Image (tube, helix red, strand yellow):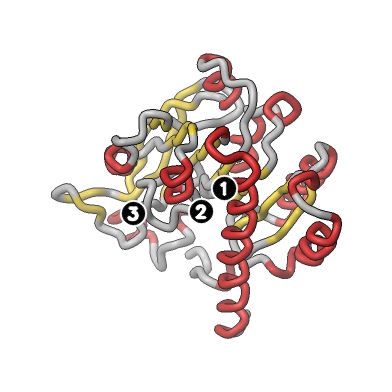
Amino acid sequence: MTSPDLKWVKFDFTDRLCTFLFGRLAAVKSEKLFFVQVGANDGFSGDPVNNLAKRHNWSGLVIEPVPDLFSELSLNYSDFPKIECLQLACGERREERPFYRIRYRDGKPIYSNKGLSSFHREIIRGHFSSDADFEESVERVQVGVVPLNDLLEERAIEKVDLLIVDTEGADQEVLAGFDLSIYAPDLVMMEHYHLDKISRNGLAQRMHEDGYRRIVGAMDTFFVKPHLFSDIEMEMLGAFHAPILAWRWEDNHFDKA
């Protein structure tokens, strides 16, 4: 187990890192920036891009399959016509898939983490101490899946500057439906928390082959294009590529029953 003090260091570092990276992108791109956020939740809770997108008048797609969260997301961006909200999931191909989400009762989520949802039952199950708690709090629904490539082609989008993926273990599936060589985002933020070591390493290798440098945060990994930064900045950021910086699943969750 990791000590509480070290946990604080990891999460505080990640917050500061995110502020630095997103701030640099905002300074370089200004209002011209186009972003895509997959797994956008309500567009407010722990959201890394909401304030910047509104402040700098960015364009983008924000994507969330859960109806209740999508309603909040749409309301959150209702005064920003350059940001389109889509109620669907993203993956490698068009299909319908079973999806696990928090139940709502009388219009309210019955579990504190309302944004907890995934294609992978075992990931959601790991947040609960028993099968009974899981069955009471989580329901299985069907959601539509569309590759990011299709969404971008339909809208004639030629460049994505910022890609954010937070999909509780389906992050690599999202990336499988997105052509890095065509859209070439300058910054990619992907949640690694629910990925095993092999998946994390495979993701890092693919991004490295496409010219990205890896920076590891507590629950997310950032992949950056070096042209955004000076040589000394890249040298400094290069110190933060070690997987040991990542917060581990077993640091936070119950063993599966």
In front: label 2 or label 3: 3
Q: Mark 2 and 1 residues: CB-CB less than 8 Å, in contact? A: yes
* Residue 191 in picture, x, y percent from top left: 59, 52
Cα distance between the residues tagged 2 and 3: 15 Å
Cα distance between the residues tagged 2 and 1: 7 Å
Q: Point out the tag, 2 or 3, that comes first from the N-terminus.
A: 3
* Residue 72 in picture, x, y percent from top left: 28, 43
| Quarter of the figure that contains the N terminus | bottom right
Tell me which residue sits at (52%, 21%) in the image: 151
Q: The disc labelled 2 sits on which kind of residue?
A: Ile
Mark 3, residues whose alpha carbon is within 10 Å: few (<14), some, or many (≥20)?
some
What element does badge 3 sit on? loop
Residue 249 vs residue 50: left or right? right
What element does badge 1 sit on? loop
**Residue placed under numbered mark 3 in the picture:** 114
* Residue 62 in picture, x, y percent from top left: 45, 36
Mark 2, residues whose alpha carbon is within 10 Å: few (<14), some, or many (≥20)?
some
**Residue placed under numbered mark 1 in the picture:** 169
**Residue placed under numbered mark 2 in the picture:** 123
